[in-house]
């Protein structure tokens, strides 16, 4: 499923894809195999003990080691290591299909938007546990209050590398994606959200949605990110929330 993104062919320009990893040796091979032509993996390893970085390197991925624990720490390290103008971030657990990325890149480059994010749509019953869905509903509601009209704090997104770095995101835990959206909205970014299929993991256990405790930690980190990120009005010629969708 790719919603209104369509099924665009891969663009000729290369795109580095950041894959934050912590013990994803079971799922990572299928994710790497699914990367479209022209989309190169940057595996940001966050202290795996199961051979994840060795497997990634053996399969030709650029591997970055980040000792500081946290989703945001891994994503930031991977982003810094990217080499392309346009970059993507996607989870390495196989729950999201890298085949969605070319259409998202086309939207970014051909429609004048600044950020394309995915809205997860469960592909099967039980994929998205109730506690994870509830927390996402609450957090996305808070985002809309801030003028960022998204319906999901999703782990797949496409943007321009330097623009992402210039946002100055400080969270290095689970609050990273929420702070990114808040800062992007405050900066007046044009945000487009598209449906993406959300599938069962290809292996391992989710650090967030796999347990109530993991979900609670993510909500805690995201709430902190929401509280400390300043409100900044978008440009006067752009009403809050109108660029999204």
Image (cartoon, rainbow, N blue to C red):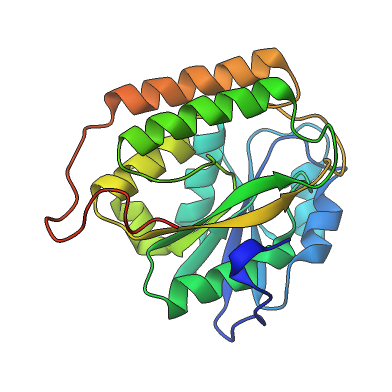
Viewer can see residue 171: no
The number of discs equals: 0
Residue at screen point 79% across, 48% down: 94
Quadrant of the drawing holding the N terminus = bottom right
For the point 45% across and 77% down, which residue is it? 109
Q: If the image is split into quadrants, where does the C terminus sit?
A: bottom left
The residue sitting at 70% across, 27% down in the picture is: 209
Which residue lies at the image location 34% right of the left edge and 60% below the top edge? 190
Q: Is residue 129 above or below residue 97?
A: above
Place of residue 206 in the rendered image (x, y in percent of width and height, measured from the top left): 75, 30
Is residue 146 shown left or right of residue 4?
Answer: left
Residue 127 shows up from this direction? yes
206 is higher (above) or lower (below) than 153: above
Instruction: Give the side of residue 44 with respect to residue 75, left or right.
Output: right
- Looking at this view, is 241 or 57 the one in front? 241
Q: Quadrant of residue 228?
A: top left
**Which sits in the foreground, 49 or 143?**
143
The single residue placed furthest to the left in the displayed view is: 236
Side of 202 relative to 165 (left or right) = right
Q: Quarter-wise, where is residue 38 in the image?
A: bottom right
Q: Nearer the viewer, residue 229 or 78?
A: 229
Is the residue 8 above or below the residue 42 in the image? below
Q: Residue 81: where, in percent of width, then height?
A: 50, 57
Q: Position of residue 201 (x, y in %)?
A: 82, 41
Measured from the top left, where is residue 147 in percent x and y?
30, 42
- Residue 132, located in which quarter of the rendered image? top right
Of residues 10 and 23, the one nearer the viewer is 10
- Left or right? Give the position of 155 relative to 100: left
């Amino acid at each position: 499923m790719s919603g209104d993104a369509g099924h665009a062919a891969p663009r000729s320009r290369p795109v580095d894809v950041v894959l934050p990893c912590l013990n994803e040796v079971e799922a990572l091979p299928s994710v790497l195999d699914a990367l479209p032509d022209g989309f190169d993996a940057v595996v940001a390893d966050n202290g795996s003990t199961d051979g994840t970085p060795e497997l990634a390197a053996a399969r030709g991925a650029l591997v970055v080691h980040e000792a500081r624990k946290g989703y945001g720490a891994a994503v930031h390290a991977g982003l810094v290591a990217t080499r392309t103008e346009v970059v993507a971030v996607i989870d390495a657990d196989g729950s999201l299909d890298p085949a969605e990325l070319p259409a998202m890149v086309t939207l970014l480059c051909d429609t004048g938007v600044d950020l394309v994010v995915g809205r997860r749509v469960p592909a099967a019953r039980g994929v998205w546990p109730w506690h994870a869905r509830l927390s996402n509903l609450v957090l996305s509601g808070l985002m809309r209050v801030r003028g960022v009209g998204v319906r999901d704090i999703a782990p797949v997104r496409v943007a321009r590398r330097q623009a992402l770095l210039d946002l100055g995101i400080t969270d290095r835990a689970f609050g990273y994606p929420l702070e990114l959206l808040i800062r992007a909205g405050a900066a007046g970014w044009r945000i487009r959200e598209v449906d993406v299929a959300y599938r069962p993991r290809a292996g391992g256990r989710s650090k967030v949605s796999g347990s109530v405790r993991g979900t609670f930690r993510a909500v805690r980190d995201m709430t902190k990110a929401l509280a400390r990120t300043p409100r900044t009005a978008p440009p006067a010629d752009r009403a809050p929330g109108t660029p999204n969708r």
